[in-house]
Amino acid sequence: MPRLTLTGLTKAYGRLTVVDRVDLTLEEGEFVSLLGPSGCGKTTTLRMIAGFVDPTGGTISVDGAVLSAPGAVVPPERRGMSMIFQSYAIWPNMTVEENVAFGLKLRRLPGDEVKRRVREMLAVVKLDQLAHRYPAELSGGQQQRVALARAIVVKPSVLLLDEPLSNLDANLREEMRFEIRRLHDEFRITTVYVTHDQAEAMATSDRIAVMNQGRIEQVDAPHLLYTKPRTRFVAGFVGRTNLLEARVEGGRLMLEALDLGPAAAVAPVAADGPVLISLRPQAMTIHEAAPDGPATLVLPATIAERTYLGESWDYVVAPEGTGLRLRVAAPPLEAHDSGRPVWLALDPRQVAIVA
Amino acid sequence: MSAALRPSRLRLLEPVMLLWLALIAALLVLVAGPLLKMVLVSFEMQETGEFTFQNYLTAYGRQRYLDALRNSLLLGALAAAMSVVIAVPMAWAVSRTDMPGKGFTWAMVLAAFVMPPYLGAIGWILLAGPNSGWINVTWRALTGATEPLVNVYTFTGMAFVIALHSFPLVFIFVKSALDLISSEMEDAANILGGGTWTTMRRVTLPLVWPSILGGFILIFLETIALFGTPAIIGIPARINVVTTQLWQFFEDPVRVEVAAAYAIPLLLITVGLIAVQKLMLARKGFVSQTGKGGERREVKLGPWRWVLFGWCLTVGLLAVVKPLLVLLQASFAKAWGRGFSLDNLTLRNYRFILFEHDMAPQSVWNTVWFSAASATIAVILALLVAYIVIRRLMRFADALGFLAMAPFVIPGIVMAIGFYAAYAGPPLSLYGSGLLIILAFAARFLPIAYASSQAAMRAVHPEMEEAARILGSGRLHAIRKVTAPLLKTSLLGGWLVVFIVASRELSAAIFLVGPRTRTMSVLLYDLTEQGNFEVVAAFGGVLLVITMVIVGIGMKLVGRDFMLRRE
């Protein structure tokens, strides 16, 4: 039985539907991110799972028991979950220790067990030296660790995280990303993580659910989301891409005059006709001389524009005899002048047909 | 699904719903009830309760009553204009310039704000009474003139005394607006060729114009609803205003219906002007909203800074130092006119008022007890309402907030008449009981408590409470363990402010006190009517000491400017 199930979950405020028939299932111990732009309904979805928002349609169940349905919602305090908030919500009137012990005391555990588990937890997040400090005396990263400790120490059925890293600076954010994944690997708590930052979602998640305008567009493992986006929105939102109009002719995928091979190899498309494809900048390489290799398609082209971004080059390449202009990424040492004729190699396996 | 449906009926009886109903009931009793009753009574015949317009005809049928109305409006406008003239240069100097003595100026503003206006009025009678006032005695001694230099018993004199205790409102309004303007606004004018004075006149002041006007309106409204100063100065000077006229309607035989009819314009003017002020302040584009960014530098004034300081010093002397000095002298004097000599010193006045007077000790106790009880009621009500409104727990939460803020647009004296009409007689017959005054004070100062509770509640992120709930605590437990401790300081601040304003309240109290429920302010007014200024001054001293103790506690526990924060 799955740990957490959302079925047709819907939330509408008057005529505005912010979450629209969301279906999602989390197995026990799974880490799933809700990824999407602001206003896509991901935080509302999370707050419905927590019980702070009542759904207008659909259900939420944990281990098969319905917790939320329209007009019948188990309050947050009886869900056995825990949550990490955007503002951390560390209580400034309590010490680190008291913050972490709060949930355990509510569960009426014996005093020495509370003490032991708090101590162990604080050691895990490396805060054991600061147990008696007040939150105002901690740095942003330390406060974040307190929030993590407070949420994990109660061994929740589901852990919810609402953009937990958005208030940290870039370096700390990267560090905490791995910290969150490390804690997940250690405790295997079923986790729903809301973020608008794709790097964060990629680094932490087993699967990512991309949301747009209240709906889930695609749920997949991070690398599949990148290489095989199924919708135009996902292709554009996750990483950068070339979205191109192509067509299927006699079962073969044709990009203008180029034959990209059998369409069935890319996606199960039955009928002939126009399709939209996504071609990642990383799926192509630029060469001074024609390379050879069986799996790649090679065509003559010209460098139309170039921009140096530090970690890579961003080229716009125009294949000869076509009206195409393709973005291509290249490592810093592969410098080609604008207007120069080059060879473009393309890996058809990295082409995705999107809806 | 049947299992899922069961809790839905229980949700209707959620504690929040019951709380909401209880609050609505409390607010109706405190706010809506008295007001409606007053309006109703104004259309009723005394005794029979039949519908009639007669009360209005009586209330506006005599030239004397119409003159009082006109006098009130003129007095309000004059006092407000004087306050603006006094306060705007002070606010600019403290907020924007390198004027010396800013701490002193602050202290004077605070003192003028805390001092009960009727004490200031009594002080000014001692200073500027036409015959024996200090200023006139000194003037005659120095020049040999026979005519007095100044006379407090005039229309201008009365307006000036009122302005000396109202100007802190304009000061607070304008200063907090000035504090939000970045120096870059002024730099931009400087670089285009505007000097300091041009810039102030053409850029800085226009930016705070809404605040100046807002302060003007508030002081105008406070003045037309003020009872103490017009009664103490105006009645001997034969200047009748609305509030003193209302008081006369309450002399035997009490004519509540006529008073109610006569109070209606006061109510309408207040509601109308507050609406105008809200509309004005809502035009955001006008007020500079750049609170952050933009560095702030002090304008260098050169020798002019001493001119400005002289202004602040003069205001401080006139509003606080001189009145307090003469009151202090009188309180320790056998006869205040005999001046500062050793053989004139006595403790008799204090002994008399603290131990021998039959009403005074009781009134001190009444004041403390009424103020504490009403502050407690107001803060608890305000906190619960603010909680429901800010957390949007109920669909009609805003109705609660509206009711809680409504007394803000009801002049205290009008509210007192409403309470008298609604609860003094049967069925509740609260006349002469402390409860009547406590409830009236709680209602009157509810907006102060509500504003501070709302600000405090906004500062506590809802996630603080949600974090407790998701870990397993119910709403009430979360409030007790998390929200309440975080609000403690601000709530204490709100409580103290209500206590202070309640302890000096006169306009509402004078209509509601019975023989055993006189407050210090009412007794002080009674003593003034008897003309024994030495005893009055001693009693005023006792009131000031109580107020200062509370202000001191507030500054220590809540913060230096807890009284003057603009909310």
Image (spheres, coloured by chain):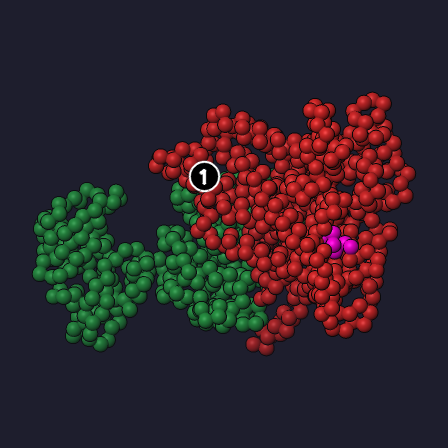
Chain colours: A green, B red
User: Label 1 marks which chain's residue?
Assistant: B
- Tell me if residue A168 can be seen: yes
Residue at horizontal 68 percent and vertical 54 percent from the top: B67
Horizontal side of A106 relative to B91 (left or right) equals right
Horizontal side of A170 relative to A101 (left or right) equals left
Residue nearest the observer in this picture, A21 or A227: A21
Horizontal side of B445 relative to B171 (left or right) equals right
Q: Where is residue A174 in the image (x, y as percent from the top left)?
A: 40, 45
Q: Where is residue B471 in the image (x, y as percent from the top left)?
A: 59, 55
- Tell me if residue A140 can be seen: no
Q: Looking at the picture, does residue A345 appear above or below residue A146?
A: below
Residue at horizontal 22 percent and vertical 70 percent from the top: A275
Asked if the magenta segment contains residue B443, the reply would be no
Screen quadrant of the C terminus of chain A: bottom left
Question: Which quadrant of the structure image shows residue B94?
Answer: top right
Q: Where is residue A208 in the image (x, y as percent from the top left)?
A: 39, 60
Q: Where is residue A245 in the image (x, y as percent from the top left)?
A: 20, 66
Question: Which quadrant of the structure image shows residue B409?
Answer: bottom right
The amino acid type of the residue labelled 1 equals: Arg
Residue nearest the observer in this picture, B136 or A47: B136
Residue nearest the observer in this picture, B200 or B19: B200
Residue at horizontal 85 percent and vertical 34 percent from the top: B350
Residue at horizontal 72 percent and vertical 50 percent from the top: B240
Q: Is the magenta stretch mostly helix, strand or loop?
A: helix
Residue that numbered label 1 is attached to: B201
The magenta stretch is B243-248
Question: In the current view of this chain or complex, which residue is farthest to the top?
Answer: B342
The local crowd at label 1, few if under 14, some if 14 to 19, many if 20 or more residues have their Cα within 10 Å, is few
**Under tag 1, what secondary structure?**
helix
Residue nearest the observer in this picture, B395 or B201: B201
